[in-house]
Amino acid sequence: MTNEELLKETLRLAAEAIGLSIDPAQIVIEHSRDTAHGDYSTNAAMRFSRLAQKKPLDLAKELVSAISSPMLEKVEIAGPGFINFFLKKDALQGVVERIIQEGDDYGRSPKKGIKINVEYVSANPTGDLHLGHTRCAAIGDSIASLLDFAGYDVTREYYVNDCGNQVEHLGHSLRIRYLELFGVEGAVLDEDDYHGQDLIEIAQRIKDRYGDAYLEDNQESHDFFIRFGIDAELQKIRDDLNAFRVRFDKITYESDIRKDGKIEKTLEFLKPYLYQSEGATYLATSKFLDDKDRPVIKADGCYTYFMPDIVYHYDKMARGFDYLIDVLGADHHGYIARMKSALMMKGYPENVLSAEFVQVVRVFRDGQEVRMSKRTGKAIAHRDLVEDVGVDAVRYFFSERSQSSHLDFNYNLATEQSSNNPVYYAQYAHARCCSVLSLGQDIPLDISAKELKEEGEMSLLRLLADFPGVISSSAEERAPYKVAAYIQKLAAAVHSFYTNCRIIDRGDLATTASRLALAKASKIVLKNALGILGVSSPEKM
RNA sequence: GCGCCCGUAGCUCAGCUGGAUAGAGCAACAGCCUUCUAAGCUGUGGGUCAAGCGUUCGAGUCGCUUCGGGCGCGCCA
């Protein structure tokens, strides 16, 4: 248990002793901003004063007199009714031993037995990934890691739209590029085709491998260009994401979702909610959460994208997940109400599906915004950015802010590799811990950390003790940026400790042994935290 | 017109189910290396929390209104 959990329990017991029943989840324990206010404080006496029908100060006095805990040095009442807790030193020091024993698992919660599917990126295989995908990849992967650390069984999933209009355009575009290589006249891209450079390269590969075998326009070559295009594009996407340390446990193809009459069976099931209008078939999603009904079959008989998506989400639920999370670009926010409605038609509760909407990234280079466009092919591609800036910096920068906020990415600054970059600040803290541990490797660590007493050491201990709580609250809120904020605070505390407390002092081995243990605990927590964001922890810099 | 996100220091952003004096990084300024990595530390300055009204012991946080920015509102995905 963390200090905060222990204090909550202590408070609950004290409340019980004076005849007040309170829910520990309702208790707020926070760090005291000022050390004069102790290590932790709570507003419980004010919060529960109405429930207890007592004045906050009176309730605080009663609670304090009923509090007993071996970890507390003293308890004080301050201001309008705050209760301030002063921990005994060994209660703070104890975290070092715990961290060193748990190692890579420090901060990890016990398995909850709850299965969550996180779907993210799911870019159409029609071109290179752009910056919007980059942010979805960083956010989605970090959310998945957070949930995993918080004890959920997580599956990372990518959905490939390999059917429909877009792949027709892909096939056509690729065919045109292929014809161009042979100088065929009249081969021109349509308005809706893909104009990116990458298709020229893929066409060249086809020419190299198959020569002029697909010059004729028939069903075989039509299907060939689509299949080849999808496979080539998807492979590039997966390579790019692997290099970005983003891997998927499961890839689902829309073409598989459409197989074996699954769509038709689902339509049959949904029949009570279907109706015809102007030749199209609509699903009455407005009977649930949506503001209007949505077409599922167009007048030309084709399915809209929504129809296979419904089958896909039913498929995910049928695979035994308790919750689904879709990480989507913010421009898709209208989508969630209709999909939740479709899930509710199947009897699932509203909250089985949640969406994380990732706001747009704006890139500034030389003081000017660089606009991106998939159509014109003049975008800053995901791959180019990662190659220029490095995986660590991009992963860090792209999860550093709340996904619901717009992100301004300063390309110049991030490629500068200067000390302005917060990711180096954190990695440097880790490298310094490694360095000092290496220099003192002959000195046995004192994992009781009992010689620690400087204020800089104590505040570092408090932060280290916070980590499990930071993980679980960040996971519940799907908020990787909170981990980034924690990393900055922790790195600052480590640098301050390193600078202000001489760690290795051969004339005082007792203090040295405690401080080395603190350095080791700091290194472990930094590495675990950075790992959740997909950022490496170098031992030397 | 309707819906979603956002508006906090010069810039980029935190601010934890409403709590003590609104914070951090960058930028600016002043110090600190013959000792463990100066990619660092220590200190200073910087705010009508977009505006107004309301809710209450207490509002950056909750509600309403207005203003400003972004994104949606398709038989596209």
Image (spheres, coloured by chain):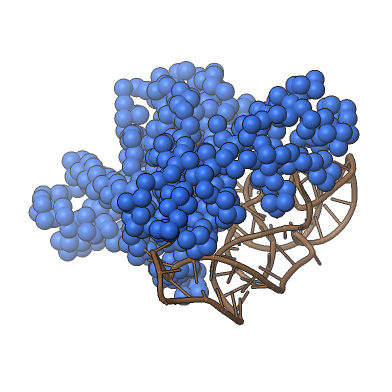
Residue A60: x and y in percent read: 81, 34
Question: Which of the chains is brown?
Answer: B
Front one among A419 and A319: A419
Question: Which of the chains is blue?
Answer: A
Q: Quadrant of the C terminus of chain A?
A: bottom left
Q: Residue shown at 24%/44% (left/top)?
A: A231
Figure disc tally: 0
**Relative to A449, B43 lies left or right:** right
Q: Residue shown at 20%/55% (left/top)?
A: A203
Front one among A263 and A534: A534
Q: Quadrant of the N terminus of chain A?
A: top right
Front one among A122 and A298: A122
Q: Residue shown at 29%/61% (left/top)?
A: A197
**Relative to A182, A513 lies left or right:** right
Residue A86: x and y in percent read: 68, 42
Q: Is residue A531 visible?
A: no
Residue B61: x and y in percent read: 74, 47
Q: Residue shown at 70%/53% (left/top)?
A: A34
